[in-house]
Image (cartoon, rainbow, N blue to C red):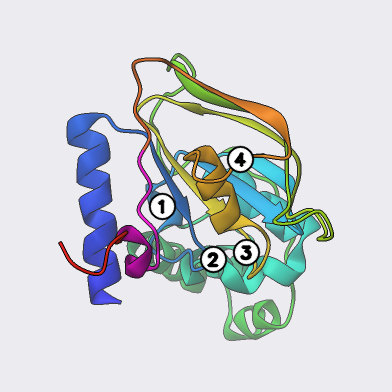
Amino acid sequence: PIAAKEFLMLLQRINIELGCTIVIAEHSLDEVLRLCNKVLFLESGTLKFAGAPADFAQYIDESCAAFTSYLPTSVQLSMLLGEKQYAFSIREARRQLAYYEQNHTPNDMQHTLHTSHRHSTTYTPNAKNISQATEILTAKNIWFRYSKNDEPILKNLSFSLKKGTIHAIVGGNGSGKTTLLYVLAQALKPLRGSISCEPQERRGLLSQDPQTMFVKDTV
């Protein structure tokens, strides 16, 4: 966990200091979600959601309760407390809990722990305005499968990435997260669809398996 956190901090520095657009495929969101400008949620190879982290938390709360346990603990606490703003850090969650304790009785708190509150929000934890940022990569109607007899891994995916932003691709195991990264990096060729990238931009891929980075047994 410590090494993973340090690695994410390094990616954040690269994004801030060098202005690189970063795409992360992950299903453990405790440290990742608060860093992102945009979240892409895959389910069985289909893009179910694309938007800001707070809107993603709302989508999960209202439309995909089975994925709630993957959200950061602080966000889950906000949902239990019925907060209109999601806490994307432990500090925010502690503040919300302290406020709740001051304004509710122990019986209220006990009831809250056994009741799921549904709410809406327009809060964005990363108050970075990206509406005017340049689109540097666009994927349109992407389909992919590993062989002609296999079921498609990616199914009609379309989205765009903006310059200088951080994106998280989330979803359960086998949902197509890593495959999508390989397709975006041109390590795999899509069955159908197109990926366009600004000519001056370069794409890089850091695999979760270090062995794939070596093409020879020795140097």
Mark 3 or 2 closer to N-term?
2
Query: Does the segment drawn in magenta span residue 120?
Result: no
Left-right relation of 113 to 206: right
- Disc 4 secondary structure class: loop
Q: Does any portion of residue 140 appear in the rendered image? A: no
Left-right relation of 214 to 189: left
Mark 2 or 1 closer to N-term?
2
Q: Which residue is drawn at 70% across and 57% down?
A: 60
Q: Residue at x 56, y 45 (%)?
A: 188
Q: Give the range drawn in magenta.
A: 204-213
Mark 1, residue position: 34
Mark 1 or 4 closer to N-term?
1
**Which tag is nearer the camera, tag 2 or tag 1?**
2
Label 3 CA crowd tier, 10 Å (few <14, some 14–19, many 20+): many
Q: Are marks 3 and 2 in contact (CB under 8 Å)?
A: no
Mark 3, residue position: 79
Q: In which quarter of the image is residue 104?
A: bottom right
Q: Which residue is drawn at 41% across and 57% down?
A: 32
- Marks 4/2: CA–CA distance: 24 Å
**Which tag is nearer the camera, tag 1 or tag 3?**
1
**Which tag is nearer the camera, tag 4 or tag 3?**
4
Quadrant containing the N terminus in the rendered view? bottom left
Mark 4, residue position: 189
Left-right relation of 24 to 10: right
- Marks 4/3: CA–CA distance: 40 Å
- Disc 2 secondary structure class: loop
**Mark seen at residue 27:** 2
